[in-house]
Image (spheres, rainbow, N blue to C red):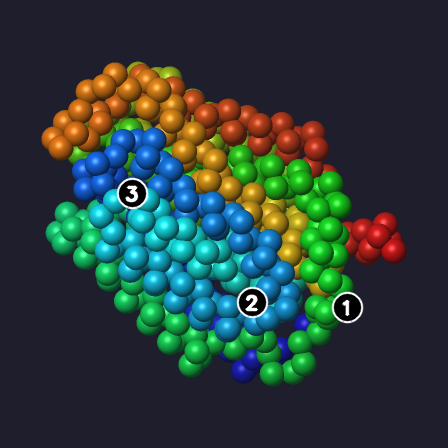
């Protein structure tokens, strides 16, 4: 793909405009983790209900991944990101006005629908504006920006909740959503001025696009690794990390939020390097193996070593975040294994596997917590969970990392950073 300097500058601008919505979406996604006590108090609920309410976001996000990918194959990022920003803003408004858990879940559901266009949108912009050899690096940069949003959803939002309350905070996020929609209408462009030609014609039906992605066995193996690689950060850093660290290591809310933030930070700072390194060594699999092992070892130490300092815990969570970043290479792998005409659909399928962890793991972990709850409550009936209950619930995390290692070692095929979709095309003709 040859681009003029003007088009390159515009491409970078468009990329970062699209990434703004991803940062925004990630802050929305993890926001319940810094207001767990307030939500349980105001809605009169326990961990199981809170886990379910938070996970509703991931239900709609997951359901929408394949439709979002198909829509990106048909329409441009400008229209879709503008609409998605407005949907998020309306969902936040609904959430902030409600006084019970079920209407709040509806608000989270709407947020998930809008947010489902964020990550795929940035990757589609990348595939349209930049040469394919830069794709893994841009995926890594995209993950870094996503973690910026997640970090913004931890310590800064925790301070905002303390200062203003969670409802006023959500109003501020709503306003930000409408501002983003206005920016996209005015400034976002779908592709370079010259005719965009990536094979994304409408010659195939939506069902055909989906079948072509799902027929590929490697799509499923990559999806499994994506689920097991990102699931731990959704379950721990996006929900239970702050209360768990407070109970296990007797940390303040601020210290626990900082420790949780380190997992996001580790994932973020390493993601661009992971993409660059993969392209440099022309390998995907070794990085997947190392990533899964880092996560497995780090969380095993956190869960099974009785005495750790705050610095040690923060370091281990940072290392676990480093391991989590390896999952971004699954997007490069599905890009390697599928033709450009269905790039949105293939990325959507893989991203569905990434976020389905929230829909499955958050409620399961909440139910496990409730199962081991001994009935103790504090002010206004907020449940108090023991360390034993948290340990049993979070045991899922090392199990996930172990599965990811086995899948990447035995089932995922190395593509050597080459597009293999031509062979795939032959199998479906």
* Residues at marks 3 and 2 touching, judged by CB atoms closer than 8 Å: no
What is the CA distance from the residue labelled 3 to the residue labelled 2? Answer: 37 Å
| Mark 2 burial class by Cα count in 10 Å: few <14, some 14-19, many 20+ | many
Horizontal and vertical percent position of residue 148: 37, 54
- Which residue is denoted by mark 1 in the rendering? 203
- Which image quadrant: the N terminus? bottom right
Callout 1: 10 Å neighbours few (<14), some, many (20+)? few
Q: Residue at x 29, y 43 (%)?
A: 101
Residue 86 % position (x, y): 39, 67
Residue 101 - label: 3
Report how far apart the C-alphas of labels 3 and 1 lie in the structure.
45 Å
Picture layout, residue 86 above or below residue 67: below
Of residue 93 and residue 230, the one placed in the foreground of this image is 93
**Secondary structure at numbered mark 1:** loop
Give coordinates of residue 67: x percent, y percent: 59, 57
Estimate the spatial distance between the alpha carbons at disc 1 and disc 2, rounded to whole Å.
21 Å
Helix or strand or loop: what does disc 3 sit on? Answer: helix
Residue, disc 2? 125
Write down the quadrant of residue 227 in the picture: top right
Determine the secondary structure under disc 2: helix
At a point 37% along the width and 70% down the height, the residue shown is 180
Q: Position of residue 14 (x, y in %)?
A: 49, 72
Mark 3 in CB contact with mark 1 (< 8 angstroms): no
Q: Residue at x 25, y 34 (%)?
A: 45
Dot in front, 1 or 2: 1
Disc 3 versus disc 2: nearer the observer: 3
Q: Is residue 118 visible?
A: yes
Q: Nearer the viewer, residue 235 or 332?
A: 235
Q: First in sequence, mark 3 or 1: give its number.
A: 3
């Amino acid at each position: 793909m040859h681009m003029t300097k003007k088009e390159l500058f515009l491409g970078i601008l468009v990329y970062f405009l699209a990434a703004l919505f991803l940062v925004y979406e990630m802050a929305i996604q993890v926001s319940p983790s810094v207001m767990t006590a307030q939500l349980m108090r105001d809605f009169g609920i326990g961990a199981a209900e809170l886990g379910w309410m938070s996970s509703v976001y991931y239900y709609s996000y997951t359901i929408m991944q394949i439709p979002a990918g198909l829509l990106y194959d048909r329409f441009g990022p400008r229209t879709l990101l503008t609409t998605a920003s407005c949907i998020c803003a309306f969902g936040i408004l609904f959430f902030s006005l409600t006084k019970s858990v079920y209407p709040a879940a509806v608000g989270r559901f709407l947020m998930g629908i809008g947010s489902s266009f964020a990550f795929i949108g940035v990757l589609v912009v990348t595939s349209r504006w930049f040469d394919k050899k830069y794709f893994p690096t841009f995926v890594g940069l995209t993950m870094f920006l996503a973690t910026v949003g997640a970090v913004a959803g931890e310590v800064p939002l925790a301070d905002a909740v303390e200062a203003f309350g969670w409802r006023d905070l959500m109003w501020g996020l709503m306003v930000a959503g409408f501002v983003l929609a206005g920016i996209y209408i005015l400034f976002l462009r779908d592709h370079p001025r010259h005719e965009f030609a990536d094979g994304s014609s409408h010659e195939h039906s939506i069902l055909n696009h989906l079948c072509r992605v799902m027929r590929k066995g490697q799509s499923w193996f990559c999806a499994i690794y994506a689920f097991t690689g990102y699931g731990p950060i959704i379950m721990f850093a996006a929900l239970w990390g702050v209360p768990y660290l407070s109970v296990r290591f007797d940390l303040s809310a601020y210290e626990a939020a900082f420790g949780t933030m380190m997992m996001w930070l580790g994932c973020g700072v390493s993601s661009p390097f992971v993409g660059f390194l993969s392209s440099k060594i022309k390998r995907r699999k070794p990085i997947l193996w190392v990533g899964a092992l880092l996560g497995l070892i780090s969380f095993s130490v956190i869960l099974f070593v009785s005495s750790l300092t705050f610095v040690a815990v923060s370091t281990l969570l940072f290392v676990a975040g480093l391991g989590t970043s390896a999952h971004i290479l699954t997007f490069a792998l599905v890009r390697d294994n599928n033709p450009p005409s269905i790039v949105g659909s293939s990325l959507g399928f893989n991203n569905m596997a990434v976020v389905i962890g929230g829909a499955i793991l958050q409620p399961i972990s909440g139910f496990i917590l409730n199962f081991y709850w001994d009935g103790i409550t504090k002010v206004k009936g907020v449940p108090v969970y023991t360390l034993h209950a948290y340990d049993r619930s979070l045991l899922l995390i090392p199990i996930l990392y172990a599965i990811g290692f086995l899948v990447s070692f035995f089932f995922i095929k190395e593509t050597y950073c080459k597009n293999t979709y031509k062979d795939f095309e032959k199998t479906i003709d």
